[in-house]
Amino acid sequence: MQPSPRLLPFLALLGMLGLPAAARAANPIITDAFTADPAPLVVGDTVYLYAGQDEAPNDRHAGYVMNRWLCYSTKDMKTWKPEGTPLTPAAFKWARGDAWASQVIERNGKFYWYAAVEHDQSHRGKAIGVAVSDSPTGPFVDARGSALVTNDMTTATKISWDDIDPSVWIDDDGQAWLFWGNQKCYYAKLKANMTELDSPISVIPDEQLHAFTEAPWIHKRGKLYYLSYATGFPEKLAYSTATKITGPWTPQGLLSEGAFNSNTIHQGIITFKGVDYFFYHTGGMQHNSKVGGGSSFRRAVCVDYLHYNRDGTIQRVQLTSEGTDLPPAKSRR
Ligand code: CA
């Protein structure tokens, strides 16, 4: 993609400084490692980004190799500071591995990290654990000593990987909710301690979602609840809205097209300093002679602006290389 004319003076300046212009492209925002399944968290004047690290070899058939989660932080949505590895699946003694999608949320000064991992033989299949820390950058420790959700607790589908992709939301009344799933989208209340379910597990009816695949992300704006998720395969993103967090949900169509060079896409949505952002991953990491390039198993986290319409619907997100180098267009609020 050609840089936009307004960036040319800036790129020329970088050239004079001896910096490679490509390294300053806004997307992907993380280039020191392959990263996937972004989960952003706003804490005061800082955004923390949590992502799984893709460690697959440069082989298009490698499959997922994910042994740790990484954290990054920013105060300006342009400069990302590596915050290391606050959590690995080894923190969960009952887990065999697989640092799959996760999300971190703050409650009463503590940070709770919900993570999908592979359970050991006692509850075969994927499971969701919760880790806790006093700091968004860790260290995090297993908050329970056991999984919060195991495969046998949900049976709407027979697959062993339906208990993945946790997303949490604390509603205005203080009630916390956990959403997750693959093929079926599940949800349940969380107790105030954030480490135990506080209701039976419900399943969102298929017709309330647009061909749900996985990657639910729950958020609220004004009085409207938004449930965004991956649809179809290769995945695109769709969303549904509701006036109650328990639904019924109304499908609102596509939120974005699929990710470049990746058969999955996984979104995280935040508002930071009055601007709405859409995090996702692609397989678009540029080739480099040391490690090769991106793929479905070597993903890279990106961010673009998200815009709401006046009626609360969301404009189709444009996935761009320029990302936050572009000026944010105004939402119709
Ligand atoms: Ca299950």
Image (cartoon, rainbow, N blue to C red):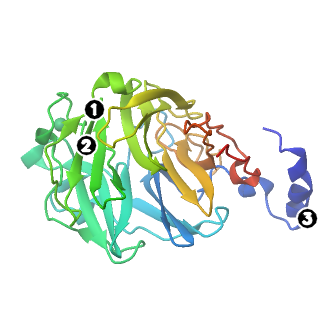
In the displayed structure, 178 sits above or below 208; it is: below
The residue identified by callout 3 is 16
Which image quadrant shows ligand 1?
top left
The residue identified by callout 1 is 204
**Front disc: 2 or 3:** 2
In the displayed structure, 144 sits above or below 239; it is: below
Estimate the x, y position of residue 173 in percent, counting from the top left: 31, 59
Q: Amino acid at mark 1?
A: Ile
In the displayed structure, 295 sits above or below 90; it is: above
> Neighbour class for label 1 at 10 Å: few (<14), some, many (≥20)?
some
In the displayed structure, 187 sits above or below 238; it is: below
**Front disc: 3 or 1:** 1
The residue identified by callout 2 is 187
Q: Residue at x 52, y 54 (%)?
A: 270
Mark toward the start of the polypeptide (2 vs 1) = 2
Q: Amino acid at mark 3?
A: Met
Q: What secondary structure is marked by label 3?
A: helix
Does the beta carbon at disc 2 come under 8 Å from ligand 1? Answer: no
Residues tagged 2 and 1 counted as in contact (Cβ below 8 A): yes
- Depth order, front residue of 236/56: 236
Residue 244 visible (yes or no): yes
- Depth order, front residue of 67/113: 113
Q: What secondary structure is marked by label 2?
A: strand
- Depth order, front residue of 78/239: 239
Mark toward the start of the polypeptide (3 vs 1) = 3
Estimate the x, y position of residue 197 in percent, counting from the top left: 17, 54
Q: Residue at x 66, y 37 (%)?
A: 318
Estimate the x, y position of residue 101 in percent, counting from the top left: 37, 49
Q: Residue at x 92, y 56 (%)?
A: 9
Q: What secondary structure is marked by label 1?
A: loop
Tag count in the figure?
A: 3
